Every structure is written in structure tokens, then in C-alpha cells.
Image: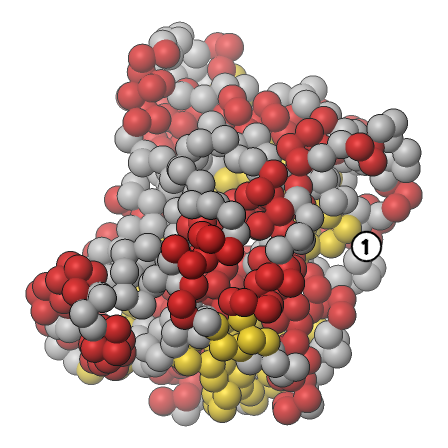
Amino acid sequence: MTAILGISAFYHDSAAALVLDGQIVAAAQEERFTRKKHDQEFPKQAIAFCLEFAGLTADQLDFVGFYDKPVTKFERLIETYLAFAPAGYRSFRQAVPLWLKQKLHVRREIRHGIGGFNKRIVFLEHHQSHAASAYYPSPFDEAAILTLDGVGEWSTSCIGHGQGNKLQLFKEIRFPHSLGLLYSAFTYYAGFRVNSGEYKLMGLAPYGEPLFKQQILEHLVDLKPDGSLRMDMRYFNYCQGLTMTSSKFHRLFGGPPRQPESEVTQREMDLAASVQAVIEEVMLRMARHAHAITGSRNLVLAGGVALNCMGNGRILRESPFENIWIQPAAGDAGGALGTALFIWNQLLDRPRVAHSGDSQSGSLLGPEFSDESIRKTLDDQKAVYRICSSDQQICDGVANLIASEHVVGWHQGRMEFGPRALGARSILGDARSPKMQSVMNLKIKFRESFRPFAPIVLLEHASKYFEMKPTEESPYMLLVAPVRADRRISSVKGAQSVLGIEKLNLLRSEIPAVTHVDFSARIQTVDPNRNPLLHRMLSRFYELTGCPVMINTSFNVRSEPIVCTPMDAYRCFMMTDMDALSLGKYLLLKSEQPIPVDSKKRDEYLMQFELD
């Protein structure tokens, strides 16, 4: 048996992944254990979980792989500071001590962090790790590869090709020109946190109009037909400063960045729509170019920009590719998995067999908890619960609650790997309810009211509600598709005069809680192979209501990582207005809990998590 551990660390979303004889066995982000959102520290607890799950000790590992090359990255840092000197001195003074203390000594950190491991450590290039995470778990024997993110060592976007057990990257865009950093600059300018608030910008885009698209293309970005781009760095500050945008950027768009936590205005909505339109155009051009130079029918994607599901949907609908597959943990966390798979397939030259669907097991690769451990947690908290005697009773109970417009926390099986809750650590609600979006945003998630929710839908019924092919899958919530016209409410009085956030108040379809203001939805299809319990429960809901669609959002509050343990789930359940909690075979109703949570305790709970 060959045991390979992949690691990503020291920037954001540290993670570990374990591959045994080419099979993905376990993977998790460090944040889920430490409860620090986007934790960047060495993933000690994630590594410990992976080893414990497989019944291995550190000395039984054959290889440890790291997802980028620190020395090359440091070279880029120094060259950049020298190019902008003396303007970047303040940023240089803050960054270099951490590099000298830790980031240049990853080999030492690994030896220290994984006591007992003394075999080979492999360092991959950042975009090799992304490419491997996209290609090797995919269902394709060969595929074009597109990786898109902020920056690795020097590369910011790459095109390549995978065939059999080998992959190659042969075109790149280099720092400082970066599609990911362009989007992050607008994330910063709109008042959201870089490397965590990009999905908020994407959710805000449909409320606006792309009024600034031409300004972006005329002043900020020189975009070529093949999707390559060069940015006018006079408008940006990330090379030499501690902010993303410069005063020249601010003058172009009519003022300083929005202050975090202040009111979101129409300007931010229009900026979000504008940069989203540019991002989609670039992604589509890159995809078409990747098809032209590889001739493949298949495309795989990874990197943080591959989490832009609106762009992914455009590629699926409008590019020449017949099939696409996106790594569920497309950001840096997925680099840990890609590194381990690259070592097995390419460096060790072991044969690869593509699996129907994919080989990522629904990305349910994290910890799971026994009913005995769950019961002990609940008893220690003096919780009141009901015991379900079978899976069917669990599904009946939860489906009935949701059909009655109750909001249910769902903690079942192995935790998801990646940023999306995929039906293991989820909050579920009735997609037919007009009030459910605002209720869940404001009373349960404690987040901005404009944020959309994603639907889960039975795979066999997806094409009846969304503009999808009858066999088309979207198991990882990484594609956007429009709600079918026959499911929409065709005429809404006064709709043409409604602008901005007021669009939320319009009833748009039969499933209003998951229909965004532009009639789009970020879809997760549910099938009986990847998640049989969720499929069974959703099928029961369909039997009760005639609707095969529910809301699925991550089991957490704003700025908290998705829950991991039963205690995490119980605490979040008690500190929010969730109505019920399904935790293994135990079902809890909020109305039956003996100890009400006062507002002071709730505030203390929420204060643990730094606001974006």
C-alpha cells in the first residue's frame, strides 16, 4: 500500500488530503476543527483526522506533498517589491519577517508538524496542484484543463491537457495580470473581505446593471480574443501596498471604497454586475481557446475563480465543450488533494481509471460521528431529543417539518470537503415559501438580506424545473442555470420599475426562495449514489408536496466555518432561530428544549466570529 498525504497551508484555507493506492480516502480543511474561518495555519488537526480515519500513523506515510513551491513564490515577492521600490516598503516590512520565520521553511514545518514522518517531501507548482485536483478525480479519460485563481508562484491562469495518468500545462498568464485579483479588487472596493467575500459580490451582481463594463475593458483590462489579459497596474495597489485598489481606481469609479458593514448602494450593485460580466467574458474566451488548442470534448476547472458558478454556467451553455467537471474544493484547499493525486499518477506513474460520475465520493470526505458519540453530546447538554428507529423515520420526520415551513439543521454522515455544504452539514428549508429567503438570511444565518440560497433538486426532476438537459448533473453546486420559463411567474405588476434590493420583494417563480432576482439558481442535483440519505429524504418531501426542490445552505452563521462536530451543530442550532435539528438518528425540536437562549448568550456566540 502506498500512502500519500497532500497539504496546503500558510495563505488561506489550509487543508490535508490522504490518498491510498490512488483512492481518495479523506480530506478536510483546518478551519472546521479550529473554528477559525479560512484558517491558514499548518493543518495539524486536518492531518490527524486523515491519519486516524485511515488507521495510519505518520511513519506509515510514503510521501507528503505540498501544494506550491515556497522559494519560487518568495522570488516573485522580492522581484515585485524591487520593481515598485520604494513604494512597497511598508508591505515588504510586514511580509518578509513571516517568510523568514515560517513560509521559507515548509520542509521544517512539515517535519515538525507531522512527528514521525521522515520520508520524501514533494513540492509541486501551485497550478499543477490545481490542475491535478481538477483532472484526476474527474470522470474523463482525457480533458482540457483550465486553472484560474489570484496567483500561485507566478502563474495566475493556465491551460493544459490531461490524458490517461499524465497532465501537462502549456499556456499561462503571469502575475500581476490576474483574473482572480481583478475580481478581488472589486470585492475590496465593494466593501467585502478579499479571499472570503467574492461570493457576496457574485450574489450581488444580479441586482445591478453592467454600467461600468466598458470602463473596465477600456481602462483596467486589455482583453484579447483568446482570453489572455493585461491589467493597467496604475489602477491597482496589491503589488506594492496593503490595499487592492489605488486612488486612480477610486477616481474612475466615482469615490472611495465602500466602508465594510455600511449600506450597500446601487453603485456597488452595478459594479458587481459589471465585473461579473467581464469575468464571464474572460472565462468564456479562455474556454474557447482551450478547446481550440486541445480539441477535447471535455473540460475540467479548478482555482478560486472556478467557484464562480455563473461563469461556469456560461461555459457549459456557450462554449464548444460537451462536458465540464469542476473540482468541488476549487480553491487552495483542493490543492492538497491535487498534490497527493499528482504524486500517485504522474510521479509514480501508476495507472488511472476514470470513474463514471467522478471519484470524489460526493466530496463527502470529512469526519463522521457515531450515534453513541452524538447521544453523549446531547445528554451532556441536557438536550431533549427523539430517537428515530430507521433512516425512513429520519426522512419522514424532516420532510414533514420542512413541508410545514420549518427550518431544519441537517448533520448526517461525513462532512463535506470544500466551501459548499452538499447535504451533510446543511440547513434545509422549503423552496416554495416566499418568506423563506429573508427568514433564513436574517434570523438564522445573520447575514445580508440580498444573499441568494441554492436549491437542491432530485436529479431525475432537475430538468423539469431548471434549464438543464435531462441527464445533466450538478452535484457540487458549481453551476448556475435559469429557472424554466413555465415555472416562473410571467407578469409581476410594476416589475419594470423596481430596482436594486427592492427586487427581492417580487415573487418570481413557483420556488421563490431559491430563484435569484435574474431567475437564476445555483443548482445542486441530488442522486442516490453520492448521498442516499439526502436523496431519500428529498424524495419523501416530493411525495408529500409534489415539489422535488428544497433550499440548501451551509450549516453555520455568518463568518463561522461550517459545523463539523455534533457539538458545533447543537450550539449553532440553539443560538439561531432554527426550528429543528436532525443529528444522526436524533431529532430535536427547538420548542422542546428546556433552556431558552437569552439574547446576551446569542450575542456572545456571534461575537466569536469576526465579521467580514
From the viewer's side, name the closer residue of 460 and 413.
460
Q: Quadrant of the N terminus?
A: bottom left
Q: Is residue 84 visible?
A: yes
* Horizontal relation, residue 151 to residue 466: left or right: left
Q: Residue 472's x, y, as percent?
A: 75, 62
Q: How is the image coloured?
A: secondary structure
Q: Looking at the picture, tell me which residue is in the foreground, 211 or 454.
A: 211
- The kind of residue tagged 1 is Glu
Residue that appears at 59% across and 76% down: 223
Up/down of 392 relative to 145, above or below: above
Residue at which label 1 appears: 467
Q: Residues within 10 Å of mark 1 (few under 14, many from 20)?
A: some
- Quadrant of the snapshot with the C terminus: top left
Residue at 36% over, 9% down: 598
Which x, y percent locates residue 31? 32, 48
Residue 325, placed above or below residue 170? above
Which of the 4 quarters of the picture holds residue 76? bottom left
